[in-house]
Amino acid sequence: MKYLLVLLVVLAVVWLARSSRRDATRMPGPSAPAQPTHQTMIACAQCGLHLPRDEALPGRGGVFCCEAHRTDYERAHPG
């Protein structure tokens, strides 16, 4: 009788392991990463650093990588 009980417990564990593994394969995995959009790279007029057009700051003398470079450039090149 005890062998029958042990057999039932082993079968239940195997059945649970298989069903959980089967459920894991059915679940969709993480979605494919989005394809990066291509952006035009432009150079900062002060230091020459290349950065995406969307991140550049426009100024009097061109585009800049940060506010400090825009300010420095505009001070050095008045008018």
Image (cartoon, grey):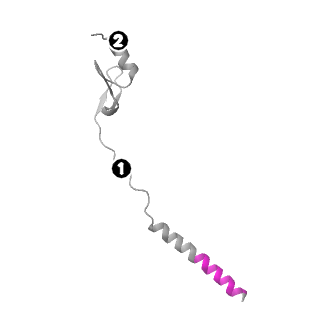
Q: What SS does tag 2 mark? A: helix
Q: Which corner quadrant holds the N terminus?
A: bottom right
Q: Which residues are magenta?
A: 2-14
Seen from the viewer's position, the closer of residues 2 and 71 is: 71
Image location of residue 48, percent across then percent down? 34, 23
Question: How many neighbours does mark 2 have within 10 angstroms: few (below 14), some (14-19), or many (20 or more)?
Answer: few
Question: Which label number is shown at residue 34?
Answer: 1
Q: Residue at x 44, y 60 (%)?
A: 29
Residue furthest to the bottom: 1
In the picture provided, is 10 more to the left or to the right than 48?
right
Quadrant of res 58: top left
Residue at the disc numbered 2: 75
In the picture provided, is 14 more to the left or to the right than 25?
right
Q: Residue at x 29, y 29 (%)?
A: 42
Question: Which label number is shown at residue 52?
Answer: none
Q: Amino acid at mark 1?
A: Ala
